Image: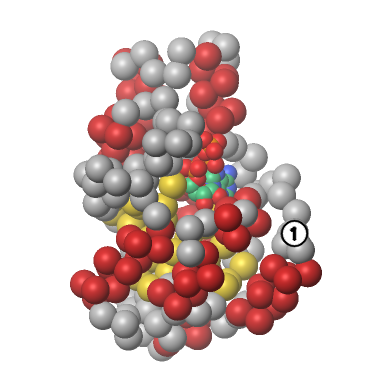
Amino acid sequence: MSDASLLALYGGTFDPIHYGHLKSVEALARQVLLRGVTIMPNNVPPHRPQPEASSEQRKAMIELAIAGNPLFTLDDRELSRSTPSWTVETLEQLRAEIGHSQPLAFIIGQDSLLSLHRWNRWEELLSLCHLLVTQRPGYPLAMETPEQQAWLAQNITDSVATLHQQPSGKVFLAQTPLYDISATVIRQRLEENQPCDDLLPPEVLAFILQHGLYR
Ligand code: ATP
């Protein structure tokens, strides 16, 4: 097994990026032997609630959070598009660049797994990538319906080797530590002038305060 072969992407709004993102993915990377993780902030569709920070600010906060951490890189392709980010389209675009035999994974939290069936063309995702799922406190471990549970049972793997060998098609539920942190709670705490020091990197917090974000 080559431990360099699996590419991993991590999508999200990152409004702002926090330790729940960073630490759970670092733990995942150790488990799955990921050499690198590409963080890909998304461009939120106009009909959804918009991020409070601008695209440039979300990007700047990610850059600050990952500076000096060789695990992470940033891909801003979705931010520089004027159209909404549909993960399936981004994955198709990437497949056109890297081909269909390269093992590729998309990282999501447990909450995103539970709502996956509401994603655009969700049934096609596993034809394009694996899904690596980090645990998140407060969300059930079982899917909402028997059909979704059957879909999970059909595609789940606990084999790291399989993730590195097959290009796509598997769901891996990682045993990551639980971080009870969300961007929503951070935004609320900042609005109420409560401390957030344990929740996100100091450089990101300094940026937020300097730019008067989330007040
Ligand atoms: P918000 O509170 O604004 O909805 P969020 O904290 O959930 O934001 P996102 O940017 O929406 O952050 O999340 C990007 C990805 O990170 C999602 O797949 C989400 O499940 C995952 N994630 C976010 N927070 C955690 C956490 N504390 N532990 C594990 N995964 C997380």
**Quadrant for the N terminus in the image:** bottom left
Disc 1 crowd rating (10 Å Cα; few below 14, some 14-19, many 20+) is few
Q: Nearer the viewer, residue 150 or 166?
A: 150
**Residue farthest right in this picture:** 146
- SS for callout 1: loop
The answer to whether the beta carbon of the residue marked 1 is less than 8 Å from any atom of ligand 1 is no
Identify which residue is drawn at 57% across, 19% down.
Answer: 189
Identify which residue is drawn at 71% across, 49% down.
Answer: 139
Residue 79 showing in the rendered view:
yes
Identify which residue is drawn at 28% across, 68% down.
Answer: 94
Residue placed under numbered mark 1 in the picture:
144
Residue 176 showing in the rendered view:
no
Rendered location of residue 123, percent (x, y) = 53, 70
Rendered location of residue 117, percent (x, y) = 60, 60
Q: Nearer the viewer, residue 170 or 178?
A: 170
Q: Quadrant of residue 142?
A: bottom right
Rendered location of residue 129, percent (x, y) = 43, 73
Q: Is residue 150 left or right of residue 55?
A: right
The answer to whether 143 is drawn above or below residue 194 in the figure is below
Rendered location of residue 72, percent (x, y) = 33, 54
Identify which residue is drawn at 50% across, 85% down.
Answer: 162
